């Protein structure tokens, strides 16, 4: 492996490279979502929930691929911070997803259920979906 014999603080082992790859994958998912969230001239609000799911899946999958305790700590801290912002989606995102002909009401139920399963949070999905349906 590159720089394996050097000990001057550079990436020196396969473990360091795999950790860098995990961090890269997670940051790449955030970068992709940021580009979608910041579109100005295209409709994109219906894609917010799907992009959030992609981020959570990336965090979960990359940390499962590497059982290193430091990766688990990073993942747990990221999930806690993520839940502070996206523990419950604002109604505008759910309404936009329902109005998307690809997603509709059943798709929203499936997406929200999958999202909270990946997040590892107990959430009353039927109540949330019924609350969103009441807006119509």
Image (cartoon, rainbow, N blue to C red):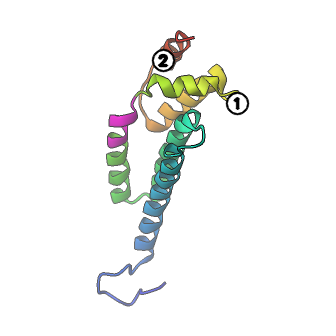
Please give the range of residues in magenta.
81-87
Q: Position of residue 32 (x, y in %)?
A: 53, 52
* In this picture, residue 84 sits left or right of residue 65: left
The residue wearing badge 2 is 128
- Neighbor class of circle 2 (other Cα within 10 Å; few <14, some 14-19, many 20+) is some
> Badge 1, how many Cα within 10 Å: few under 14, some, many 20+?
few
User: Measured along the vertical axis of the image, is residue 124 above or below residue 85?
Assistant: above
Extreme front residue here? 41
Question: Looking at the image, which residue is at 56% across and 13% down?
Answer: 133
Q: Nearer the viewer, residue 11 or 66?
A: 11
**Residue at the extreme left of the image, as rendered:** 8
User: Dominant secondary structure of the magenta stretch?
Assistant: helix
Spatial CA span between label 2 and label 1: 20 Å
Q: Which residue is mark 1?
A: 102
Please state the horizontal and vertical placement of residue 132, each as a whole percent of the image. 52, 16
What percent of the width, then of the height, locates residue 127?
Answer: 48, 13
Q: Position of residue 113 (x, y in %)?
A: 54, 27
């Amino acid at each position: 492996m590159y720089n394996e014999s050097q000990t001057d603080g550079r990436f020196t082992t396969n473990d360091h490279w795999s950790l860098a790859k995990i961090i890269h994958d997670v940051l790449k998912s955030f970068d992709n979502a940021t580009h979608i969230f910041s579109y100005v001239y295209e409709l994109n609000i219906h894609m917010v929930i799907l992009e959030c799911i992609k981020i959570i899946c990336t965090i979960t999958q990359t940390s499962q691929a590497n059982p290193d305790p430091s990766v688990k700590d990073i993942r747990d801290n990221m999930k806690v911070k993520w839940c502070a912002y996206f523990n419950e989606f604002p109604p505008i995102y759910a309404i936009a997803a329902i109005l998307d002909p690809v997603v509709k009401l059943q798709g929203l139920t499936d997406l929200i259920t999958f999202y909270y399963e990946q997040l590892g949070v107990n959430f009353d999905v039927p109540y949330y979906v019924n609350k969103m349906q009441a807006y119509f």
